[in-house]
Structure formats: C-alpha cells, structure tokens
Amino acid sequence: MQEVVLRTRGLTKRFGDLVAVDNLDLEVRRGEVLGFLGPNGSGKSTTVGMILGLIRPTAGSVDRMGIPLQRIGAIIEGPAFYPFLSGRDNLRALALAVNGMGERDIEQVLNLVGLGSSAHRKYQTYSLGMKQRLGIASTLLCDPELVILDEPTNGLDPAGQQEIRALIPRLAEEGRSVLLASHLLHEVEQICDRVAILRRGKLLAEGLISELTQQQAYLEIGVSDLATARELLSGLEGVGGVTIEEGFLHVDADASSGSLITKTLAEAGIYVSSLSQKHNSLEDVFLELTAESSAVQ
C-alpha cells in the first residue's frame, strides 16, 4: 500500500442551504495520479479550496499528513504570467516571491516540462500548450510533494492536450502525488491510476480504473437472430440484463456463463458467430453512476 499524503474525513461544506461537499472521505497516495471527477457543480473546486486552506470547512477535516501548504503546488484556474518576460524570467520572479528554487533548479524544472529550449522566449509568444506547461512548472518551484491541477488541458488543441498528458505522469514518476480535477474522462483514463467520482458533493466511487471498469464487464455476442436470442437469454441463470447494441447482444454476465449461453442458443437453433468479454470504459462507468445518483436525488 502506497503512503497516504492527503486524507479527508467527513469533509463537508455548506453555503446556506446548498451542500457543496457532503461528508467526503478521500485519500491521495504518494507517487500516484488521482483523477478527481464530477460534472459541473459536483464540488470538486470547493474540495480543492478546502485542501488548500482557501475555504473553511463546515465540518470534517483535511489531513495533509505533515506536508506544509508551502509544499503543495496548485493551478486552480488558468495561470497568469507577465507577457513581456520570458518563461525563465517569469519563473525567476515567482521563485523570489515564494522563496523557492534557485537558478539551477529552475533550469531543471524548465527541462522537465519541455520548455528548456524555449525558456528565453517571451511568454506572449507561447502557444496555449506551452503556457499550460509553464503553469505546471510554476507549481514545482516549491519542490512540492502534492500537485493539484484543475482542468489543465482546458481550451487546448489536441497537440497541447497531448503535451500535458505526457507531462503529468512524469511528475508522479518523480515521487510526487498529483490530484487531477477534470471532466475529460478519456484523458483521465489515459493518465490516472485511480479515480474518485463525485456528484452533488457526494463520493460515488473511488478505486483503480481497472477495477471500476471490470466491475462493469459484459459479454458481446454475435448471433443470427438477435430478437429471439435476447428473449431466450433474459432470465437465464447467471445473466443480468440483455440489450441489442450496434448489431450485437450485450449480456450482463461474466465469461464463466459463456458455455451455458452458447448451449442455450444452440439448442434453439441460433448460430453464435462471436462471443467476447468486454469492459465498459471509464466514461460508461461515470455516466451510469451519475445517472443513478441523479435519479435517486
């Protein structure tokens, strides 16, 4: 088990009658990228504000496990820099303001984010992807143990998004922990180890992406008679729901049920052309969880 560097217990924030964060238990572990997911208004930004000490909780606690706030780097909104200064000089100015890194370390940070060769250029000449990378570089000036990034690829073109996706795992490889708040599920699936999913301030699920998606496994079956096959399999032992999607049966069952399914169809004279186990994407899991939560509330 990886070392926990941040833990919240019962974290709650109310704004009048609005419960923005509701009894949140969350852990961030050393050297991981944790995707912090939720639709707009789910409480992600309020949670980040409480972690950083910018918002006072109504109840519950934030335990930074001995990490001082000065060792947490964060971008909450788009980074702002002096347009007529170079990337390097912008970092120098920030380092002086926060009593951060020296000259040699600044050069290492610039190289880490891929700006070493363009650090001399004025900030106003940077592409959006370069600006975001400089923003991430600014979070590293305090040599942070925890880095919090809020929608770091927002507004970027595909090339800029790819630059940031390649950079974030490198931060974790250095032993830093990254809390990535995002609503771009395909992006999170590519770069995160674990995810925590919120809706209306409540934690719906937390765990490894592989575990969450495998919990939503199904069998995709190609058959000669879709309608009859669906009717036969509905209610069969070990089988949940059966739907027809894009010319295939989607059967809520694990691979161990495959032999019973094929036998049942064969006895009815239905030819099975293909059978494979599939896993839903993180997006599928997210939509199912948030839709159920919405229906309950």
Image (tube, helix red, strand yellow):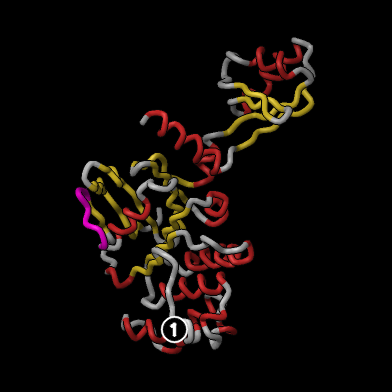
Q: Which residues are magenta?
A: 54-60
Q: Is residue 33 magenta?
A: no
Residue 198 x, y percent position in the rendering: 39, 44
Name the residue nearer the viewer: 288 or 200.
200
Residue under label 1, please give it: 90
How packed mark 1 is, by other alpha carbons closer than 10 Å (few <14, some 14-19, many 20 or more), is: many
Q: If the image is split into quadrants, where does the C terminus sit?
A: top left
Residue at 48%, 86% (x, y): give it. Answer: 84
Q: In the picture shown, does residue 65 fall above or below 109?
A: above
Residue at 55%, 65% (x, y): give it. Answer: 164
Name the residue nearer the viewer: 80 or 27.
80
Q: Amino acid at mark 1?
A: Asn
Name the residue nearer the viewer: 42 or 255.
42
Q: Quadrant of residue 180?
A: bottom left
Q: Secondary structure at mark 1?
A: helix
Q: In the picture shown, does residue 94 fall above or below 297?
A: below
